[in-house]
C-alpha cells in the first residue's frame, strides 16, 4: 500500500471526502454557529458543526472502506481491521471558525499502521501517512499530498523555501489553551522572536504546515498537537521538501513538532533549545 501509485489511488477518496465535508462546514458556517461545549479549558471550544462535520466524514469513510479505522477529534475511535486508519480533524481552527476569521480548515489523512497492534495515538502516528488533504473552505484552497507523489495546491506542485538563513526566517507557531502552558510557550517565544524575521500565529496547525509547504512561511513549531492536527499537514510539508521531526531528534508527536527546509532545520531546532524548548 505504501507505493506512490497505491497512495495516489487512496488520495482520490481522501480528496473527495475532504471536499464534501468542507462544503458542508462552509454552508453551516454561513447559517451561523455557536459554542456547543468546551473541552480542556473554557477557551477550548467545540461547535455543533465540528461534530456534524466529523460525523459526515465518518459516514463517508465507512461507506467506502468499512474495514478501515477512524481517529477523529470529536468522536470515539472506530477500530478497523484493514491496517489503515483515517485521522480526521473536522474543523482545525475552531475559534477562527466561531469568530468568522477565514483561517480554518478540514484535515483528512489516512495512515498505514506500523504493526498489527499499532494505531494512531492522540499525539502521533505509529506508521506511515499515505495520503492527506487540507482544505481552507473560505479561500477555496485545497492542499494535498500522497507519499512519494509530491504535494500540490489546486493541482500546482509545492516546494518549501530553501536557502533562508535563520535571521530571515518567517516562523509559524501556535499556543495551547491552558494558562500555565501558554506562560511556558511565551517564555520560549521571547527567545525565538529576536532571532528570526517575525512570528505568525494563524490558528490552525494544518494550515500552518500547508503554508510551509507553499513557501508562505519558512519554519513552524508547536507543542501539544494531536495526531489529527498534523497528520495531513505534516505529510504535505514533507512531500514539499520539508524536514519534520519532534523532540530530541524523534518523530513529531504531542510533545513537539518542528518543520522547516532541511538546510534551516538544525539551526532552527538549536534556537528552540537555546530558548528553553527541548528540540
Image (spheres, grey):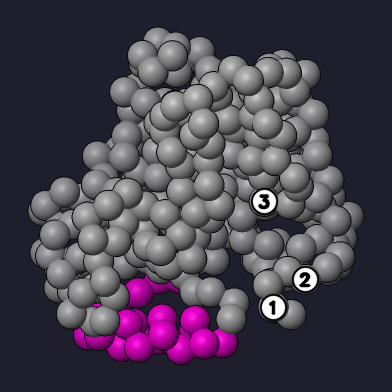
Q: Residue at x 34, y 22 (%)?
A: 149
Tell me: 106 left or right of 232: right
Distance from the alpha carbon under mark 1 to that under mark 2: 7 Å
Please tell me which residue lies in front, 102 or 111.
111
Q: Secondary structure at mark 3?
A: loop
Establish if 38 lies above or below 4.
below
Q: Position of residue 164 (x, y in %)?
A: 14, 59
* Total labels drawn: 3
**Given contact means CB atoms under 8 Å apart, are the residues at marks 1 and 2 in contact?**
yes
Image quarter where the C terminus lies is bottom left
User: Which quadrant would residue 221 be assigned to in this image?
Assistant: bottom left
Q: Are marks 3 and 2 in contact (CB under 8 Å)?
A: no
- Secondary-structure class at tag 2: strand
Q: Which residue is denoted by mark 3 in the rendering?
A: 73
Q: Is residue 256 left or right of residue 31?
A: left
Q: Position of residue 205 (x, y in %)?
A: 49, 58
User: How crowded is the residue under tag 2: few (<14 C-alpha within 10 Å), some, or many (20+)?
Assistant: few
Q: Which mark, by number, is residue 41?
A: 1
Main secondary structure along the magenta-highlighted residues: helix
Sequence-first disc among 3 and 2: 2
Q: Going from the N terminus, do you reach mark 3 or mark 1 first?
A: 1
Residue 203 x, y percent position in the rendering = 54, 66
Residue in the image at 86% along x and 65% along y: 36
In which quadrant of the rendered image does the N terminus lie?
top left
Q: Which residues are magenta?
A: 179-201
Q: Which residue is mark 2?
A: 38
Residue 230: within the magenta? no
* Magenta-span inclusion, residue 190: yes
Amino acid at each position: 500500500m505504501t507505493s506512490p501509485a497505491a497512495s495516489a489511488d487512496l488520495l482520490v477518496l481522501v480528496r473527495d471526502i475532504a471536499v464534501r465535508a468542507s462544503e458542508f462546514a462552509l454552508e453551516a458556517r454561513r447559517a451561523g454557529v455557536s459554542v456547543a461545549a468546551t473541552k480542556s479549558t473554557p477557551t477550548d471550544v467545540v461547535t455543533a458543526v465540528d461534530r456534524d462535520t466529523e460525523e459526515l466524514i465518518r459516514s463517508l469513510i465507512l461507506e467506502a472502506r468499512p474495514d478501515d479505522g477512524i481517529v477523529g477529534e470529536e468522536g470515539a475511535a472506530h477500530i478497523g481491521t484493514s491496517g489503515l486508519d483515517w485521522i480526521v480533524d473536522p474543523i482545525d481552527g475552531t475559534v477562527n471558525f466561531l469568530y468568522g476569521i477565514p483561517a480554518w480548515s478540514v484535515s483528512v489523512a489516512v495512515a498505514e499502521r506500523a504493526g498489527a497492534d499499532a494505531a494512531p495515538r492522540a499525539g502521533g502516528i505509529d506508521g506511515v501517512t499515505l495520503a492527506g488533504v487540507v482544505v481552507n473552505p473560505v479561500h477555496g484552497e485545497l492542499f494535498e499530498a500522497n507519499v512519494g507523489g509530491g504535494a500540490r495546491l489546486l493541482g500546482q506542485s509545492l516546494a518549501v523555501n530553501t536557502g533562508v538563513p535563520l535571521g530571515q526566517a518567517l516562523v509559524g507557531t501556535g499556543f495551547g489553551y491552558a494558562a500555565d502552558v501558554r506562560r511556558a510557550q511565551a517564555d520560549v517565544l521571547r527567545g525565538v522572536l529576536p532571532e528570526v524575521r517575525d512570528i505568525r500565529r494563524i490558528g490552525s496547525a494544518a494550515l500552518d504546515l500547508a503554508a510551509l509547504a507553499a513557501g508562505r512561511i519558512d519554519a513552524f513549531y508547536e507543542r501539544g498537537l494531536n495526531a489529527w492536527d498534523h497528520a495531513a499537514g505534516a505529510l504535505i510539508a514533507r512531500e514539499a521538501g520539508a524536514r519534520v521531526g519532534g523532540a530530541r531528534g524523534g518523530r513529531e508527536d504531542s510533545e513537539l513538532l518542528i518543520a522547516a527546509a532541511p538546510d534551516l532545520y538544525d539551526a532552527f531546532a538549536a534556537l528552540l533549545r537555546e530558548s528553553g524548548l527541548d528540540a
